[in-house]
Amino acid sequence: MSTTVNDTSAKKRTSGELPAPCTRRVAIIGGGVIGGGWAARFALNGWHVNVFDPAPDADRLVDEVMKNARRALPMLYERVLPEEGSICTCETLESALQGVEWVQESVPERLELKHEVRDAIEALVPTDLPIASSTSGFRPSELSDGAAHPERILVAHPFNPVYLLPLVELVGGDAATVDTARAILQGIGMYPLVLRRENDAHIADRLLEAVWRESLWLVRDGYASTQEIDDAIRYGFGLRWAQMGLFETYRIAGGEGGMAHFVEQFGPCLEWPWTKLTDVPELTGELIETVASQSDAQSGQHSIRELERLRDDNLVAILRALKGQGAAAGTLIAEHEMTLPELNPVPPVENASDSLERTSAASSGSFMLTVHRSIPVDWTDYNNHMNESRYGQVFSDAADAVLLHVGCDSDYVAGGLSWFTAENNIRYLAETRAAESIMVQTRVVLSQGKKLRLLHDMRRVADNTTLSTCEQFLLHVSLDTRRSCAPDSSISKRLDTLFRAHQGVPS
């Protein structure tokens, strides 16, 4: 993979993966952790990204974020993401704003600086172009004070890492600006939460600030160490929050009486002096040293990059588990995945001539591209490579792609007919590791009534190395009798067309 380019021209990152160039462009103003995360989220969803940050190491920081994002985000999906957009670090603000349809400002949290940057942006872009700020603390009314067009100024507050966590709080701007923001952010797989009204620190950071403040008191007064507080969160309520949030969790805690019973039972506790949420501990040198030394002892043996990688891998595994359950943020990922292009897209077959055209197009190069994806971290084992059971899943997905292509869809199965795998012969030729992009090329080597034999070739995209092969034998089955039977004649014709197209290919 190429690295971030340090000039004002758009240089496309080439990957050799299903070219689907995108002409959409975004400007990221400020290339720190949040700005870099925004750049990664947009670029990995096919947008071209212009980054402007006068800091001398801005391009290096953005590239380090990109390396983590390029590894992690594709692991969430069963489909391949769009062709990666270019990322260009620009020498001037004017060049960064050329041809963009969205501006995301992520400069440090100083209001005078944000006003200065906003004024410079407004002087260079069309009057209706949305200008969003990543601010965690300032209200949109503060950001837009003195703006030439305050109606297009809004807050779009994300969470780190931006390329994995979907939430973005939206507040401010007029209705048209909010609608534009919602559409753009949903298009890159995020969850725009539109606030009812502006307030200090929006919603999520107000909650986080309360927990952070109380945690500092617990450390200062010697009740807990930083690790003990983190353990209380990650082994306890943090797991509940990840999939149900706060109120739904407490609704369950109320038993059959629900939320009303919970509030009635535990509400009086709110009057007890358990917390110091309205008091702020003085950040003395002693408290800062205590927090820093305990934090270093807790995880200081790992570099920040190692901790980021661990965080990302854990988030991927949690999000994929939620996706499998169709819950919380996992639902959002599944919905976004359905907007990603399918392999070998073709219109429905209406007659035999359409079938011939369909299968010929799919067989270009004498094989079908049936799988193209990134290997998720939860597919790997203690040897740090893909577990052998997952090869079976990959080849099963490849076979499903062939069958779906020839018309064996959910309606066909609902009609009482399907294909069962009778035999797999898998050869493991090279290690497959997490985050590697792989593709499977499939050809039909036998189509004989109720008998179907497929040959799958799984390759690493980066160097075209064959990682594994599978010879798969399937039988067509009646789901009523659970015995083999002939498939529908239209299915047989389409499979025969693929079989003929695949002849003469070297083994």
Image (spheres, grey):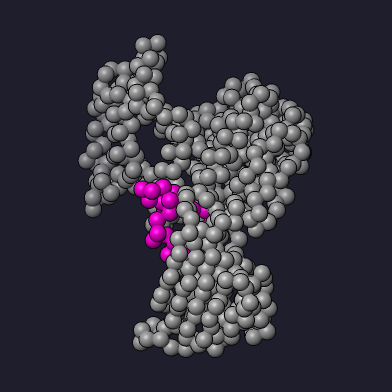
Task: Give the left or right position of residue 88, taking residue 136 as reference.
Answer: right
Residue 467 in sight here: yes
Identity of the residue drawn at 67% across and 73% down: 361
The quarter in which the N terminus is drawn is top right
Q: Is residue 151 within the magenta segment?
A: no
Q: Is residue 473 above or below residue 486?
A: above
* Rendering quarter of residue 106: top right
235 or 209, which is in the foreground?
235
Q: Is residue 246 above or below residue 423?
A: above
| Place of residue 451 in the rendered image (x, y in percent of width and height, measured from the top left) | 47, 83
Q: Is residue 168 above or below residue 301?
A: below
Task: Give the left or right position of residue 42, taking residue 391 as reference.
Answer: right
| Place of residue 280 in the rendered image (x, y in percent of width and height, measured from the top left) | 38, 18
Q: Is residue 76 above or below residue 146?
A: below
* Rendering quarter of residue 415: bottom left
| Place of residue 431 in the rendered image (x, y in percent of width and height, measured from the top left) | 47, 53
Q: Is residue 376 within the magenta segment?
A: yes
356 or 143, which is in the foreground?
356
Q: How many marks?
A: 0
Q: Which residue is situated farthest in the top direction here?
A: 285
| Place of residue 484 in the rendered image (x, y in percent of width and height, measured from the top left) | 40, 86
Magenta span: 373-395
* Rendering quarter of residue 367: bottom right
Task: Give the left or right position of residue 182, taking residue 250 as reference.
Answer: right
